């Protein structure tokens, strides 16, 4: 072609007519997770320009990631949900319930059971159900305590522990656990599950692997090895959240016996993992993203986030119409500060919508009577744009 197509000379979003967003909400998939680091973008470009044997690349990349994350093994997947699916398949195989050569025997597949607390059920466990395994629920959907007076009765949590023991049987292939702070401690996971350490202890007694969904549990960086160090068999992280790799990538870390099985059933093999392809570009980009995340200055990053929250507070000092206060931790229970903003006379949802209706659009999430502004997905100068957006709202609401 002699002439440049318009998307070669202008931003692709502008070409398609898609408005860009200031993401002050956090690492939500609906907004694209995080911004990829420039070094990961460069790695994708480098990888795309050469052909390699994908199994060789995948094994070398996984070995390197296992080393820097202090794990026996690691495995790159096409997102955290894909990792849930593959982890469950591996547990089914290693339990001996579904031999590799009889995946077409769906009756044997359907006999497999994964135990999960009711309070840990969420939309992401569809990935587990896709294997054909059955989810066996234990416990109440939230904590229910006894009267509180000294008595000989057990609390509901104790009963949940008993139910966990009772539910383990020949068909149990894994126990699933959602990591993160519970709602009452500032996180997003409903309370009501048995303690992680207790689950690990019971699982070990019965020889049942524990799969941990820690997709959004970075930072702190130590979580890359803390869960497996505690005794988890497989821990799953999103590659496109705070590690700032490709949104379409995920990372599994844990026991080599379980993760090495995926070289036989996962990408690029034919079989149950074939549909979850990971390209050489994503593999290369995730290696660089994890490497950078492990070795970056996390204290400096935390200091920057604190400064951004303080900057927003300072912008509205003395204005009684608006309240800006520091909130900690953030919505996923990560040790990152954010700001809770309230405007007199406006509901949380009204403020979310008012910010999003502006140009540029500002994405936030609602809190109690206000919105949360999360600096973890923002860059230098964007907090000023958030402040300007809030000032425009205040001008419109003036009597």
Image (spheres, rainbow, N blue to C red):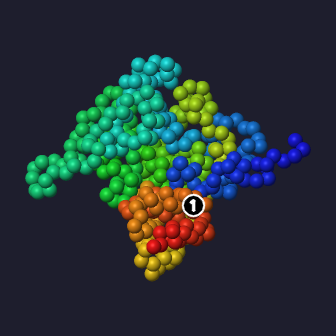
- Residue drawn at x 30%, y 33% as measured from the top left: 168
Is 157 situated left or right of 53 in this image? left
Give 240 or 92, whichever is nearer the viewer. Answer: 240
Disc 1 secondary structure class: loop
| Vertical comparison of 65 with 302: above or below | above
Q: Residue furthest right?
A: 2
| Vertical comparison of 262 with 215: above or below | above
Is 58 situated left or right of 234 in this image? right
Is 7 situated left or right of 355 in this image? right
Image quadrant in which the N terminus is located: top right
Is 48 situated left or right of 160 in this image? right
- Residue drawn at x 72%, y 45% as measured from the top left: 47
Expressed as whole percent of the image width and height from the top left, the position of residue 379 reads: 60, 64
Expressed as whole percent of the image width and height from the top left, the position of residue 17 reads: 67, 49
**Residue 69 showing in the rendered view:** no
- Residue drawn at x 59%, y 68% as measured from the top left: 385
**Quarter of the image where one finds residue 150:** bottom left
The residue at which mark 1 appears reads as: 358
Expressed as whole percent of the image width and height from the top left, the position of residue 350 reads: 44, 59
Expressed as whole percent of the image width and height from the top left, the position of residue 109 reads: 42, 24
Q: Residue furthest left?
A: 151
Number of numbered discs overlaid on the protein picture:
1
- Residue drawn at x 55%, y 31% as measured from the top left: 273
**Residue 165 showing in the rendered view:** yes
Image quadrant in which the C terminus is located: bottom left
Give 194 or 73, whichever is nearer the viewer. Answer: 194
Q: Residues within 10 Å of mark 1 (few under 14, many from 20)?
A: some
Give 166 or 333, whichever is nearer the viewer. Answer: 333
Q: Residue furthest front?
A: 399
| Vertical comparison of 189 with 88: above or below | below
């Amino acid at each position: 072609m002699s002439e440049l197509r318009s998307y070669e000379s202008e931003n692709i979003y502008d070409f398609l007519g898609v408005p860009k967003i200031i993401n002050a909400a956090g690492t939500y998939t609906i907004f694209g997770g995080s911004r990829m680091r420039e070094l990961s973008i460069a790695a994708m470009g480098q990888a795309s320009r050469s052909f390699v044997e994908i199994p060789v690349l995948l094994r070398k990349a996984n070995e390197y990631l296992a080393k820097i994350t202090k794990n026996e093994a690691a495995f790159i997947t096409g997102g955290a949900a894909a990792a849930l699916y593959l982890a469950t398949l591996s547990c089914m195989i290693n339990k001996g319930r579904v031999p590799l050569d009889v995946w077409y025997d769906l009756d044997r597949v359907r006999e497999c059971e994964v135990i999960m607390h009711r309070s840990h059920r969420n939309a992401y466990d569809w990935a587990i159900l896709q294997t054909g395994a059955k989810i066996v629920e234990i416990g109440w959907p939230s904590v229910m305590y006894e009267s509180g007076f000294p008595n000989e009765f057990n609390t509901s949590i104790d009963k949940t522990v008993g139910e966990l023991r009772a539910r383990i049987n020949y068909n149990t292939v894994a126990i699933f656990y959602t990591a993160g702070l519970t709602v009452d401690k500032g996180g997003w996971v409903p309370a009501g599950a048995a303690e992680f350490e207790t689950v690990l202890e019971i699982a070990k007694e019965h020889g049942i692997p524990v799969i941990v969904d820690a997709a959004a549990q970075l930072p702190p960086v130590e979580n890359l090895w803390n869960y497996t160090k505690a005794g988890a068999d497989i821990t799953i992280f999103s590659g496109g959240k705070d590690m700032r790799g490709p949104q379409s990538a995920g990372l599994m870390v844990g026991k080599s016996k379980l993760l090495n099985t995926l070289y036989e059933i996962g990408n690029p093999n034919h079989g149950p993992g074939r549909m979850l392809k990971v390209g050489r570009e994503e593999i290369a980009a995730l290696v660089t993203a994890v490497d950078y995340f492990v070795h970056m200055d996390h204290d400096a990053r935390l200091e920057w986030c604190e400064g951004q929250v303080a900057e927003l507070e300072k912008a509205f000092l003395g204005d009684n119409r608006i309240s800006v206060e520091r909130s900690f931790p953030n919505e996923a229970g990560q040790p990152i500060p954010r700001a809770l903003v309230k405007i007199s006379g406006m509901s949380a949802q009204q403020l979310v919508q008012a910010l999003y209706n502006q140009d540029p659009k500002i994405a936030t999430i609602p809190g109690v009577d206000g919105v949360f502004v999360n600096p973890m997905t923002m860059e230098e100068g964007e907090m000023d744009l958030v402040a300007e957006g809030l000032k425009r709202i205040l001008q419109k609401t003036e009597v």
